[in-house]
Structures are given as C-alpha cells and as structure tokens.
Amino acid sequence: MEISVSDWLQAANHEVELRRWREESGGKTKHFVAEHLFPNASSAMVFWYLTNFDQASYLMWHPAHIGLQWENKIAGPGATHIAWEKMLGKLAAYRIRLDTPDKSPIPPKGRGIAVMLNPIDTEGEILFYILNEIEQTEGGMKVTCTFTFPAATPDEFMEAHRRHNIEELQGLVNDAVPYLIRKTFGYMIEPEKLAAYGLIVPA
C-alpha cells in the first residue's frame, strides 16, 4: 500500500487526539458492549484466522479498511499489526497488539476464549481496550466485544467504533475467514484440524 504525507499527518493527528483523551481522563473510563451471533460458524476458524490474516483478507472486513502492515507476526501475545482504516472520515493507523485478557479493565465473563486486541501508542502504552470473547454455542458462535475508552473520549467517536464493529465482524466471519482458509489450504479444512497449523501465512 502507498501512504502519502497527508495520510501520515492524518494518522499522527489521530493518535495525538487519543493520547489527549487518555491524559484528560485521569484513569477514568467508559465502555460499550456489542454482541454478535453467527449461526453455523466455528470459533476455531476465527482463532486460526486472527493469527494468520493478511492484507487481502483484512480488506474484506469493512469498506473503511485501507491496508494492513504486520510488525510482529507471531502466534500469541505480542503479535502486533498496523491497521489503516477510515474513522469518521479521517485516516487512522491503529497499531494493535494482541494482549492477554488480564489487561482488560472489565474482566472476561469466563465463557469461551477471551482475545484482547488493544490499540497502542508509539511507546507501547494502550490507547483503548478491545476485549473479544468468542464462544461456541449450540447453533454456531457468539462473539462479545467490549470496547473500553478513556472517559474524555467523545461519544460520537465511540458510536463510530460501535457501528464499525457491528459491520466489520460480518465481513470478518462471513467473507475473510473462509477466503483465507481456501486460499491457504485449497479447500475448507475441518475446523478442528486448524489448531495444528498455527502460524503458517507469512506477513
């Protein structure tokens, strides 16, 4: 992907705003929860995908997604990527790190598996928290996403992320996950076999 000077400036200003809201909040937070139900979907496929996703499949999540750059593509905590996407008409470069669930200000409910994908600043400090709880249900899969922002974050900004999350989870599960599995293996491999492969898609 090509990044212009204007793109870099928009992304840098985006991080400046997030840092300012964090400092103004003095440790206080606010949050929202979005629940997603996917009939006949497999949590094993989503876990494998979140370790292996690439640029082409990332663009399938949402029309606002512009590009993807992996900084540290590993299987497990510490994996870091930069997600270029439009938010409220401005370009953001979210540097997102896979963290353990104990980082969440709001503890997981204990059902299924919890995955944290936290946007961080250039010093590695968390800007806001995204806790994803993924559980297999009798009819498919349930994903519960809890976004925790600094209290000074504008409500408009949080609402934009709530709408974006609802839309992008559909693209991730229904389009991006099956695409990457077929691209990697040549067919839809059985979900229970995916755990054996771990990290196999290069950055």
Image (spheres, rainbow, N blue to C red):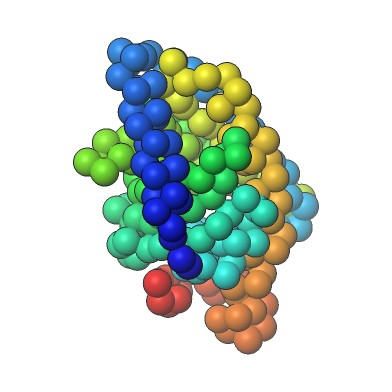
Estimate the x, y position of residue 25 in percent, counting from the top left.
Answer: 36, 14
The reply to whether residue 192 is visible in this rendering is no
Q: In this view, does 176 lie to the left or right of 146?
A: right
Residue lying at 54% horizontally and 40% vertically, measured from the top left? 90
Q: In which quarter of the image is the C terminus?
A: bottom left
Instruction: Please identify the quarter of the rendering in which residue 183 is found.
Output: bottom right
> In front here: 159 or 173?
159
Relative to 161, does residue 178 appear above or below in the rendering? below
> In front here: 188 or 97?
97
Instruction: Please identify the quarter of the rendering in which residue 4 is found.
Output: bottom left
Residue lying at 44% horizontally and 60% vertically, measured from the top left? 3
Estimate the x, y position of residue 43 in percent, counting from the top left.
Answer: 60, 56
Instruction: Please identify the quarter of the rendering in which residue 121 is found.
Output: top left
Residue lying at 60% horizontally and 74% vertically, measured from the top left? 181
Toward the front, the furthest residue is: 5
Q: How many marks overall? A: 0
Relative to 73, does residue 202 appear above or below in the rendering? below
Estimate the x, y position of residue 142 in percent, counting from the top left.
Answer: 66, 44
Relative to 172, does residue 9 appear above or below in the rendering? above
Residue lying at 53% horizontally and 32% vertically, measured from the top left? 146
The reply to whether residue 156 is visible in this rendering is yes
Q: In this view, does 154 lie to the left or right of 29?
A: right
Estimate the x, y position of residue 31 in percent, counting from the top left.
Answer: 52, 22
Relative to 29, does residue 109 appear above or below in the rendering? below
Toward the left, the furthest residue is: 123
